Image (cartoon, rainbow, N blue to C red):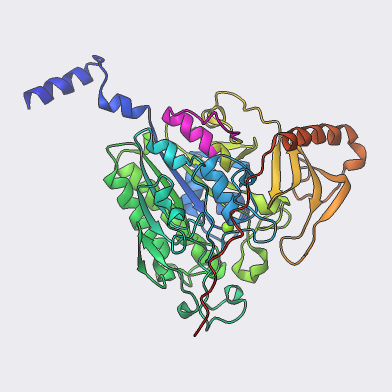
C-alpha cells in the first residue's frame, strides 16, 4: 500500500518517469464500425427526414462529420479488403468483373501476403477483435479464409452476407420482400472457429454483436485494442429485434438503422463508462452505397446519383463520422477522405510503420482529424471490379466508363469522358466536359501514371467448392 501511495504521489506531483500508462497513452484504441449498404442519405445527421439516429447525430455533433467520405469499392468484398489493407482491391485480387464478391462456396480469400490492419496492430501489442460480417473468405470451405488467420484474436459473426445461403423454401428474390421469414435463410454464426448457430437468428444479431463488442472493450480495457465491427445490416434481408421492429416511420429499413444507431450509442457509452473515450478513435462508415434494387428494403443515397454496385457517387460516397473526445473538435469536414486512409492513419496513431514493400493507397489523415493542416491527395480512383471507371482530382470527376449498378450487362465507354464538378453538382447531372479540356487532360495524366505502376493480383473470387452430386 505504501509503495502504491508513493507511486500515486509521484504521479500527482508530475514527477516524470516512464509509466505503463504513459506508454499506453501513445497507443490509442481504435474502433471501426462498418455498416453494410447504408446510404449517404440514411442518417438524421446526413439529412434523412424520418429515420431517427440520435446516437450517430450526437457522435457527429461531438466529432467530425465528413461530407466527402468514400468506400474503396461499390460492393462488399472489395470494399472490406481495401479497408483492412489500405490498398485498392485490384492490388490484392479481391475483386472480379463478373462475380464481384465472394460467394457462399468460394475458395478464395484475402491473400496471406496482404498485411491487414489487425496484423499490423497486433504486432504493436493490440488486442484485436472482429465482430460481424467478414466476407473476406468462407471458412467452411477454406479455413485460411477465417478472420483469425488474418490478425484477429477474437471473432463473432457471419462469414458472408446474410442473404447468401437461401434455403430451398425461399422464394426467388426473397431479399426484396417486405415480409421476411427466418426459414428462408441459413447463414452460420461463428464464435471464433466454431459455428455456434445455424441458421443464425437474424432478429437478434445486432443486439448480440453489440453485447459482444461491449464485452470485448471491457475485457481489453487495460491494453490498447482494435475493434473492427462490421455490422450485418442494413443489407437485406432485414431483421430487427423486438425492441425496434415496427417502431420507425421508415418501415423495417428504418427499424434496422435505428437499432444500429442504438448499437453505436452503447459502444460510445461503454467507452465513456470505462474512461476510455479520450484515448479511443471511433470511426463510423459504410461499405458501399444503398442497394436501390431492393425496393423499400434498400436505403437512400440522398442527393447522390445511383447506389450500391455503381461508380456514380451514390455507390461509393458514404457517411463517415470520426469521434475522439478531446482530440477531434466538432467539425464538418469537406475534404475528401476514404476507408483506405483508416489503415494508414490507424498505424500512424499506433506508432507502427506503414508497410514500405508495397503500394499503400490510404493516406495519413491525422492532419484533417486534428485540424493541424491539409492532406494532399492527387486523385481518387473509382473501380468496379478490375475496371477503372472514373477518377476524381480536386472538385472534378471524370467517368471513362459507366454502368448501371444492376441490369446493364455491359459498361458504356465515354470518349471524351463525362466530367462533373462535384462541388457544384454533387448529383452528377450536368456534364461539363466541353468547357474543361485542361481538367480532363490533367486527370488523364494522373490516371495514366496510376495505370502504368499498377500490378493487378489474380482474382480470388473465381474458384468455388463444387456442389456434391446427389446419389
Ligand atoms: Mg455492402
Tell whether 246 sits left or right of 429.
Answer: left
Q: Per the image, is 110 magenta?
A: no
Q: With 138 as the anchor, is 454 left or right in this view? A: right
Viewer-nearest residue: 36 or 45: 36
* Residue 175 pos. (x, y %): 58, 73
Judged from this view, the residue extending furthest toward the left is 2
Q: Residue furthest right?
A: 434
Please identify the quarter of the rendering in which residue 277 is found. top left
Instruction: Please count the marks in the image.
Output: 0
Residue 225 appearing in the image: yes
Q: At x 70% / y 56%, what residue is drawn?
A: 97
The residue segment tinted magenta is: 342-360
Location of residue 342 in the rendering, given as x and y in whole percent from the top left corner = 52, 38
Residue sitting farthest toward the top: 15
Residue 127 located left or right of residue 177 = left
Give coordinates of residue 72: x percent, y percent.
Answer: 62, 46
Picture quarter containing residue 360?
top right
Ligand 1 lies in quarter? bottom right
Query: Can residue 38 be seen?
Result: no
Locate residue 67 relative to residue 325 in the image: left or right: right
Question: Which residue is pictured at 67% across the width and 31% down the height?
Answer: 377
Amino acid at each position: 500500500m505504501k509503495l502504491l501511495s508513493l507511486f500515486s504521489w509521484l504521479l500527482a506531483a508530475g514527477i516524470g518517469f516512464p509509466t505503463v500508462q504513459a506508454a499506453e497513452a501513445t497507443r490509442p484504441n481504435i474502433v471501426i464500425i462498418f455498416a453494410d449498404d447504408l446510404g449517404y442519405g440514411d442518417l438524421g445527421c446526413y439529412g434523412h427526414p424520418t429515420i431517427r439516429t440520435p446516437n450517430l447525430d450526437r457522435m457527429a455533433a461531438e466529432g467530425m462529420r465528413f461530407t466527402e467520405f468514400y468506400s474503396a469499392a461499390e460492393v462488399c468484398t472489395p470494399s472490406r479488403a481495401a479497408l483492412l489493407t489500405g490498398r485498392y482491391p485490384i492490388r490484392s485480387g479481391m475483386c472480379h468483373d463478373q462475380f464481384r464478391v465472394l460467394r457462399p462456396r468460394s475458395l478464395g480469400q484475402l491473400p496471406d501476403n496482404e498485411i491487414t490492419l489487425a496484423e499490423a496492430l497486433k504486432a504493436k501489442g493490440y488486442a484485436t477483435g472482429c465482430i460481424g460480417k467478414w466476407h473476406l473468405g468462407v471458412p467452411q470451405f477454406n479455413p485460411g479464409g477465417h478472420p483469425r488467420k488474418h490478425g484477429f484474436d477474437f471473432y463473432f459473426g457471419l462469414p458472408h452476407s446474410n442473404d447468401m445461403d437461401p434455403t430451398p423454401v425461399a422464394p426467388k428474390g426473397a431479399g426484396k420482400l417486405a415480409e421476411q421469414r427466418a426459414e428462408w435463410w441459413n447463414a452460420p454464426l461463428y464464435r471464433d472457429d466454431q459455428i455456434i448457430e445455424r441458421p443464425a437468428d437474424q432478429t437478434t444479431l445486432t443486439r448480440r454483436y453489440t453485447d459482444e463488442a461491449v464485452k470485448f472493450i471491457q475485457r481489453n480495457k487495460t491494453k490498447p485494442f482494435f475493434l473492427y465491427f462490421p455490422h450485418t445490416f442494413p443489407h437485406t434481408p432485414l431483421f430487427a429485434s423486438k425492441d425496434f421492429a415496427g417502431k420507425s416511420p421508415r418501415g423495417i429499413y428504418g427499424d434496422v438503422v435505428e437499432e444500429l444507431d442504438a448499437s453505436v450509442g452503447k459502444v460510445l457509452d461503454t467507452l465513456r463508462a470505462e474512461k476510455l473515450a479520450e484515448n479511443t478513435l471511433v470511426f463510423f462508415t459504410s461499405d458501399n452505397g444503398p442497394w436501390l434494387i431492393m425496393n423499400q428494403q434498400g436505403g437512400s443515397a440522398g442527393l447522390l446519383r445511383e447506389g450500391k454496385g455503381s461508380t456514380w457517387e451514390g455507390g461509393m460516397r458514404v457517411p463517415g463520422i470520426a469521434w475522439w473526445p478531446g482530440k477531434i473538435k466538432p467539425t464538418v469536414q469537406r475534404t475528401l477522405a476514404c476507408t483506405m486512409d483508416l489503415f494508414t492513419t490507424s498505424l500512424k496513431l499506433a506508432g507502427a510503420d506503414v508497410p514500405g514493400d508495397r503500394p499503400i493507397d490510404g493516406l495519413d489523415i491525422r492532419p484533417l482529424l486534428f485540424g493541424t493542416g491539409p492532406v494532399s491527395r492527387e486523385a481518387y480512383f473509382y473501380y468496379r471490379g478490375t475496371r477503372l471507371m472514373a477518377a476524381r482530382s480536386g472538385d472534378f470527376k471524370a467517368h471513362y466508363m459507366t454502368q448501371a449498378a444492376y441490369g446493364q450487362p455491359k459498361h458504356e465507354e465515354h470518349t471524351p469522358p463525362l466530367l462533373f464538378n462535384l462541388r457544384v453538382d454533387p448529383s452528377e447531372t450536368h456534364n461539363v466536359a466541353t468547357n474543361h479540356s485542361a481538367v480532363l487532360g490533367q486527370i488523364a495524366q494522373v490516371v495514366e501514371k496510376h495505370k502504368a505502376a499498377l500490378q493487378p493480383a489474380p482474382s480470388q473470387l473465381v474458384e468455388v467448392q463444387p456442389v456434391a452430386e446427389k446419389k
